[in-house]
Structure formats: structure tokens, C-alpha cells
Image: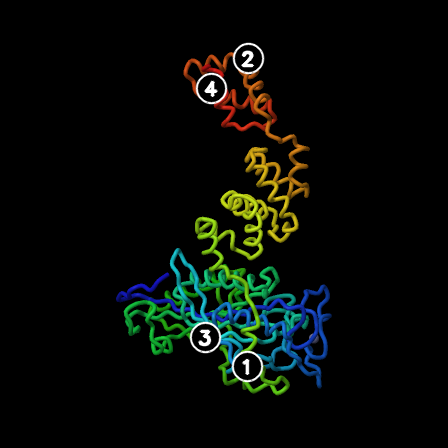
Amino acid sequence: MTAKALQQGDLVTVIGLEVHVQLETDTKIFCRCSTASADEPNTNVCPVCLGLPGALPVLNEAAVEAAVKIGKAIDAEIPEETRFHRKNYFYPDLPKNFQITQYDEPVCADGSLEVRVDGDRREIAIERAHLEEDPGSLQHVGGGIDTADYTLVDYNRAGTPLMEIVTAPDFRSPTEVRAFLAELEEVLEYLGVFDAERDGSLRIDANLSIIPAEEIDGEDTDEIGEEALAAANRTEVKNISSHKGAEKALAYEETRQKNAIQRGRAVEQETRHWDETRGITVSMRSKEAEKDYRYFEEADLPPLQVAHWKDEIEIPELPTARRERFQAEYGLSEEAASKLTSTKQVADFYEDVAAEFDPDLAATWVADELLGELNYRDMVVTDIDHRLDEVARLVELVATDEITTKNAKEVVLRTMLDEGDDPDTVVEVEGLGKTDGDAVQAAVVEAIEENPDAVADYEAGEDGAINFLVGQVMQKTGGSADPGDVNQLLRAELEG
Ligand SMILES: [Zn+2]
């Protein structure tokens, strides 16, 4: 959404995000424990991620590589040198009583990401993105966070590499936030540094404030000065774990604050917890200020020279560029190009099929038929990417007119996915090969001979009777004739 002119009485929504993304590395950020999900709690642990005395962290190169890839994708500055700090606080999920994170020298700064909302483009500034370690996870037993009988701690997650991405307060609606998160997820997946399917891989804290137009010293909704921003009370909403969740939580919070302001009540500056089940935000105890964390340099990790990594690390073509290329190169609509670039795997798959046949036909088959059938079965394109040849063959069977489109969609594709058969086998077993012209013609003549009443109706001008005859021919040919062709053959025969 582009900036809107300010009107007297407007209440402008201002939102900024802190997005925590789990980086997809084999091992943790400061030790060699696996990051894979484990069946048993506290099994992927060692003295380092348990914070035992004397254990020293060693930085995982793969985590830094992923961070630099993200930095390049968001067009951020990668400094000459980056540094780690300790953020001190006590919580049971943090065995060292401090979190190793980055403070004033993050690995990425001053980037941006362009998002599309309702056809408009909007650039969201990203102030910084830094590396840190994930804490362990807590399981509250017998109640919620405040009412549980007891709480279990699992340190399997402790030390999983995280990237915290901090945006400027550039969002003006919850819808924009959702679009941004969806775009960010796509970019991260293209980079191969993120797995959206992993539980807890995306966690969002959002701050939201409502500013009356009268207090804004600008012309439109984008021109909000720092003073107006600083003067507004904001709430920080925690515990958001998806883009849909973010939109819902922030829409709730937006309404809550606007209602308070319209009734002349002050909005309190506080931290609120998004209760997904109840669909509301609830007040939590007030938040610590930054100075309370007593950040100081992590002496066990030397400063890291990262500038040269930027030149050495390659990143693939990103979703926006690929969408635009698909439109230009294959003549696809924006909608089709968006669907086909939704993940790198789908885009690669499409390009492989398009290389064999008409890109338009490939787009229809991959974007509409294949993705729809996969989605219905809770499958993704990577589940069948070893069967690329079979999908290409299916498109070929349709392109060369060997089977009808209807049979290709409703029988061959579905049987391929459900039974794992290749398309030629399905065509043979189900007898779907298009009946040749002579056989169809014979069936047409037969249908006319066997149904004098329908023929009489047709000749009396009742055009619907032709549909009955088409049905008869389709039955005789086992559904393997083209209904349009049959219709024409019948008319020719009846009128000839
Ligand atoms: Zn460990």
C-alpha cells in the first residue's frame, strides 16, 4: 500500500517487527550437537549448549554463511568485522544465564525487502539482522504459562542458530506485515537457509502503536517523524509463530488500541502475549529495558572478519527476479508466475517441464493441476521431484493428443500420485488411449441407430437431445473420445 494523504481525525497504525528465524544448519551454532528434531528430550546436548563450567563455544561456519546469504538477499551492509556479545538474564531455558547474541556490531545492517500488497509495491527497511543462539524450550504441564502445575525444560533446541531480523517501523497495516513475512519466508527458502515446516522455525515479536493524524508533522502516512513515533505508546506483542498469526494478532491489537483512543483512554506501554487459541492478546508483566541486560563482549569468541565472505558466497536468483523473468521469458501472467515461483523447488520443476514442451501448457499443468492435487494430498513438489520425467510424459500425452485432458487430470494424474504408477501404465491399465477416428465414427453410427427417439427429438429441433447421444457415444468408447469431436461427428452424421 502506498502512502495515503492524512486527514483530520485519522488514526495511523505503525508497526515494526523483530523476526527470529531458525537457520537450517546440521549442527548448532557454538557446538557440534545436531539440530535435527529428536524423539527424546535432552539428547542433542553437550557441555557447551548445557552451559557446563569450562565449556567453550566454537562458531559454526555454516551459520555465518547463512547469515551472509541473508545479508546479500536483503541488500544489507556486511561490515569488515562483526562481534558477539552476552545478553544477561535468568530464565530456566537459558542454562548459561546469558545468551550469546550480537549487539552493536551485527553481521548485517541497513537492508530492505520489497513486498507486494494488493498490486502495490512497498519497500520495508531492515535496520539490522544478527546471529544468536536459540534458548531451550519449556513445556508447561497442567496449565498455561501462569497456571501450570510444573514446567519441563528441554535443551535440544538450545544453541540452534537464529537470525534476528529487525525492521524499521515501516508497516501501516497488519496485511502489509503478512505480505512481508510471506515474502521473507520465500526468500529464506530460496537461499536454502530455512525450513518453514520445522516447528518454531519462525517466531515474531511485533510492536504496534496508533498515532493520531494531528500529532504527525507530515503530509501522508509515510511521513511520520521520530518525535511522533517516540511520543506514542506502543505495545510489543510476543508469541506469534506464523504470517497468518501475525496478521490476526496485530489486527486484534490495532482494534484494541483504536478503541481505547476513541474512548479517550491512554494506551499503556507494555508487553502482550498473543493467545492463538483464544484469538486475543493478553497483558504480560512489563518488559525489561535494554540496559537491564548488561550487554558485554563475549570474550570467548574473537571478532570475526566477514567482509570477504560477501564476495565469496553466491546466492541464487531470488523470487522477485524469478517472477519477473517468468513473465518476460515465458509470457506468463503475474498470477501464474507467482504460483510457479512460490518455492524454489516448484520454480525449478516448472522450468524443467517447460524446457520440454510449450511453457504455457507446462504452466497450466504445474500451477493448476499438479500443485492442486499435491496440496489436496498434503504433499509438496519435492515429494515427486524424482518423477519429473513422468510429469513431463503426462504433459506430452496431452500435447500430442494421445489422451483427453479430462482423463489426464481426473484419472492419470490422480492415479500417478495415489498409486505411484507411471502415466503410460495408467493409460494402458485403465484403457484411456484415445479411441481412433474409425472406432468413434462406428460408435456414432451405432448410437444413432439404437436411439431413434432421441434422433426424432433432435430433428424436431430439440437441441438438448444431442447431449444424450454424445453420452451414449462416450459410454461406447469408454470415455476415451473427445466430447467436442463426438458432438460434431453426430451433427454431421444426422444432417448429412
Ligand atoms: Zn551442544
Determine crowd level at label 1: few under 14, some 14-19, many 20+ residues with C-alpha closer than 10 A. many
User: Identity of the amino acid at label 4?
Assistant: Arg
Q: Is residue 489 visible?
A: yes
Q: Is residue 88 visible?
A: no
User: Identity of the amino acid at label 1?
Assistant: Thr
How far apart marks 2 and 4 lie (CA) works out to 14 Å
Query: Which residue is disc 2 drawn over?
Result: 449
How far apart marks 4 and 1 lie (CA) works out to 79 Å
Label 1 residue near ligand 1, CB within 8 Å: no
> Which residue is pictured at 58% across the width and 82% down the height?
304
Viewer-proximal residue among 315 and 344: 315
> Which residue is pictured at 42% across the width and 59% down the height?
116
> Which residue is pictured at 50% across the width and 13% down the height?
453
- Identify the element where label 1 is drawn: strand
User: Identity of the amino acid at label 2?
Assistant: Glu
Q: Which mark is residue 82?
A: 1
> Which residue is pictured at 63% across the width and 70% down the height?
137
Query: How far across and down, in percent of the image, does residue 240 sit?
Result: 52, 65
Q: Which mark is residue 110?
A: 3
Name the N-terminal-most of marks 4 and 3: 3
How far apart marks 3 and 1 lie (CA) works out to 15 Å
Query: Which residue is disc 4 drawn over?
Result: 491
Left or right: 254, with 23 as reference point? left
Name the N-terminal-most of marks 4 and 1: 1
